[in-house]
């Protein structure tokens, strides 16, 4: 199974199998995360790109057990490193996976510590209109739920970015999420002073006037992003206040088939 083309076929099959939450949980329980992450260290561009895309798919709507295994097996710094790769497929797959992991509050500090916030900010700056931009923006907003990551957002110039996107009609569906993220800086006087100077108050006033129906505006589609499912919102809650009960997935994964672990 050491042949790169054969491995690439196996990884592509894994990506295809990761087509539903139930399948992704099953693959995680069977121990697929660790060998997949190991392939992110390979040099063959085709195999590396396939592994990055498969990781992005396996972490989609990331469940706690999957995030826990990615963290335990050193996947977060590896993905952060690959998010600056020269190959577009590798870069996009790695950054998407990092963004997916942000749906679990307990790994967000690690994502920020590995440089993930700077990568998300840079991706949104350079390609704010790309199909992946809403997912990157969601991940960045979730990172604003922890104090340690709010400091990183501020240091990386994320406040300017969020304010700029709040002014853009093209990101109207994410405006409520952006406002919620900025609300996390309420007790950061330096950040609030900075946002005030940059014109946050007029932007918020304009939103308030529009929402109150005091101004007619052309229909631009949904005014807010779809609400999080209760379970997703619970798992994405700030890890500044860790849950009292153990994180889902603390149990060890089930015995995986030797065929896949031998990759």
Image (cartoon, rainbow, N blue to C red):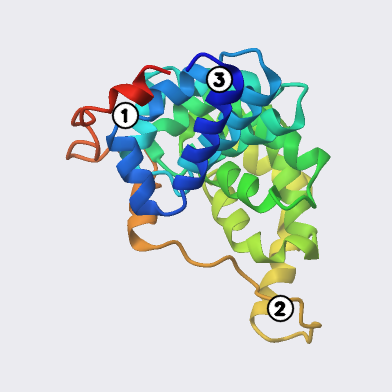
- Sequence-wise, which precedes: disc 3 or disc 2? 3
Q: Nearer the viewer, residue 54 or 149?
A: 54
Quarter location, residue 167: bottom right
The answer to whether residue 110 is left or right of residue 85 is left
Residue 180 place in picture, x, y as percent: 54, 55
The answer to whether residue 146 is left or right of residue 47 is left
Residue 144 in sight here = no
Q: Residue under circle 3?
A: 40
Q: Residue under circle 1?
A: 31
Query: Residue drawn 76% across and 82% down?
Result: 219
- Sequence-wise, which precedes: disc 1 or disc 3? 1
Mark 1 near mark 3, Cβ–Cβ under 8 Å? no
The answer to whether residue 88 is left or right of residue 117 is right
Q: Nearer the viewer, residue 44 or 251?
A: 44
Q: Residue under circle 2?
A: 210
Query: Residue drawn 37% across and 25% down?
Result: 260
**Secondary element at tag 3:** loop
- Whether residue 3 is situated above or below residue 211 in the rendered picture: above
Q: Nearer the viewer, residue 161 or 9?
A: 9
The answer to whether residue 75 is left or right of residue 163 is left
- Whether residue 91 is situated above or below residue 42 in the rendered picture: below
């Amino acid at each position: 199974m050491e042949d790169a083309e054969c491995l690439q076929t196996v990884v592509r099959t894994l990506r295809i199998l990761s087509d539903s939450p139930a399948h992704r949980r099953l693959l995680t329980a069977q121990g697929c995360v660790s060998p997949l992450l190991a392939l992110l260290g390979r040099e063959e561009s085709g195999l590396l790109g396939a592994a990055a895309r498969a990781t992005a798919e396996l972490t989609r709507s990331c469940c706690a057990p999957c995030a826990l295994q990615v963290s335990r097996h050193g996947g977060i710094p590896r993905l952060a490193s690959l998010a600056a790769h020269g190959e577009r497929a590798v870069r996009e797959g790695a950054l998407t996976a990092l963004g997916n992991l942000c749906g679990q509050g307990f790994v967000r500090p690690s994502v920020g510590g590995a440089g993930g916030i700077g990568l998300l900010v840079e991706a949104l700056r350079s390609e704010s209109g790309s199909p992946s931009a809403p997912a990157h923006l969601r991940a960045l907003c979730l990172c604003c739920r922890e104090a340690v990551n709010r400091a990183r957002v501020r240091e990386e110039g994320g406040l300017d970015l969020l304010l700029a996107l709040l002014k853009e009609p093209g990101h109207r569906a994410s405006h409520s999420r952006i406002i919620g993220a900025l609300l996390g800086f309420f007790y950061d006087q330096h950040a609030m002073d900075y946002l005030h100077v940059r014109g946050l108050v007029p932007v918020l006033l304009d939103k308030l006037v529009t929402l109150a129906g005091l101004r007619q505006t052309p229909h631009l589609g949904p005014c807010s992003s779809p609400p999080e499912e209760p379970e997703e919102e619970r798992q994405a809650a700030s890890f500044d206040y860790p849950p009292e009960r153990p994180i889902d997935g603390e149990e060890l994964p089930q015995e995986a088939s030797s065929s896949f672990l031998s990759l």
